[in-house]
Amino acid sequence: MSETVEHSAQQQPKASTSKQQYQKPVPHPSLAFPRSLIRDGDNVLIRLPSTAIKAIKISLNGNVSLGKYGAFKSKALIGLPYGQTYEITEGELKVVHTTLNDIEETEATNENISSTGAQKITFEDIVALRNEGKSGREIIQRQIEEHSAFDLKTEYSKDKYMKRKEAKFLQMFTTIEPTVHNIALYNYEKQPAKVRDLRPDTLSQLLSYANVRPGGRLLVVEDLHGMVVAGAVERMGGEGRIMIINDSDSPPDVHILESFNFSAEQTSNIASLHWAATEEDWAPPDLPLELDPSTAKSKNSRELTKIRRRKATFDKAKEGRDDFLSGKFDGLIVACEYEPYSILERLLPRLAGSASVVVYSPHLQILHDCLYRLRNDLNFLAPAVIEPWLRQYQVLPGRSHPEMSGMPHGGYLLTCTRVFPDTAIHSVMSGKRAAKRRRLEEESRQRESSKEGEAGEA
């Protein structure tokens, strides 16, 4: 929600539902800032008055340019909390404190307002005011004074008018913490194809159905550039194991993780394997990993460093592969363009009993085909396809209602549970039906015996 201005009764009628106070931002006194405050090197999301979101990186010597909304030095945000709104004044930041007020309804209507000619100030006048160094608030005030029908507007119409002008002329922004929800929403609105139309609420349901929690063991097959992995990292907090299965021998593409402010401890439980390494009979390429004492002295420092790095990489990959082959993973998430059932078949032996399986796809038909095959597979219990549904609301005093335009489609989820089939075990109902059948057969035999006895006596 954009902030608005309160005018005095002598100037103009009240045209806003909020009241603002300005204060110079005071950084946190500690040098080792907690994660709730903005730190040097952090990624921060900026919401502009136009509701557009921009991603920036904080540095001591960097500058942040917001186009027509102004510019400032990024170090001015270090030590300040997320969620505050700032106004840029001559390169300096001022904290804007906003409180909401109820709108007082009047008998005014908009029926006598002409659609054209009410605004006397022209574009050339606005350019001239900017050249004179007038602030955005002064330009808005001048527009109100030159608007011949402003007093005829309803209070709601005045509030909407002010918000439109503030989004156009005020140099303000709000800092947003790069959480999984905020980053998912940012990518969904800016580049939906990058995350395969994965909506933030769909991601939250996906993680919940997969039972992602601290200490869990999770298999992830995704091509969303790390969006699903980031959600798992935030929930697990470095405890447990996140095993990524990717296409090539190189590290997986999870560059979205760089948009967060995760610590090395939080991402320490991530490991990756390519599909070939998931086979038990696979062997790594034969490359020199140890230094030969007889030739070590003849090698230069670059070659020695290269061998040591290769050895460290090999040891880490071997540790991850041994962990994968040990199995007992209690969750599997699939969110990629490949046919899902073949992936489930390939990874089935590594799943523990009662492991949660979730498959995401923006296309229903792909999941429908997989659902049909899972219903005939005794290794999976209760497969179902779910379509997440979301409605956004405007929440303002006296004006809370659903948004007129909803969010686009957010994809589908297929959920099921990994079980170990036993043909000797039957359900309760099947047992009751078998018992009833045996009882009827026994009664039938008794009737036939009694009839044979009566015939013999006759």
Image (cartoon, rainbow, N blue to C red):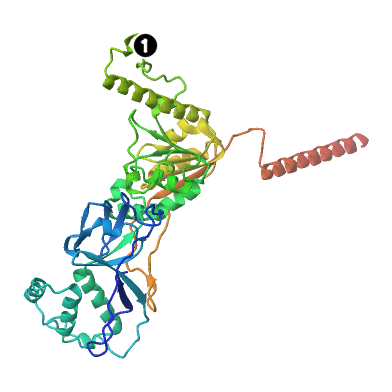
Asked if residue 437 is positioned above or below residue 105 in the image, the reply reads above
Give the total of numbered labels: 1
Question: Which residue appears at 85% of the width and 39% of the height?
Answer: 451
- The furthest residue to the right: 457
Question: Which residue appears at 90% of the width and 34% of the height?
Answer: 456
Question: Disc 1 on helix, strand or loop?
Answer: helix
- In x, y percent, where is residue 26? 33, 65
Residue 223's quadrant in the figure?
top left
Question: Which residue appears at 21% of the width and 85% of the height?
Answer: 150
Residue 401's quadrant in the figure?
bottom left
Query: Which residue is more in the foreground, 443 or 431?
Result: 431
Query: Which residue is more in the foreground, 405 or 83?
Result: 83
Query: Which residue is more in the foreground, 355 or 45?
Result: 45
- In x, y percent, where is residue 106? 32, 89
Residue to which mark 1 is pinned:
293
- In x, y percent, where is residue 441? 76, 39
Q: Is residue 236 left or right of residue 403?
A: right
Q: Is residue 426 left or right of residue 339?
A: right
Going by the numbered disc 1, the residue's amino acid type is: Pro
Q: Quarter of the image for the N terminus: give it.
A: bottom left
Q: Is residue 16 left or right of residue 275?
A: left
- In x, y percent, where is residue 231? 42, 47
Q: Residues within 10 Å of mark 1 (few under 14, many from 20)?
A: few
Q: Quarter of the image for the C terminus: give it.
A: top right
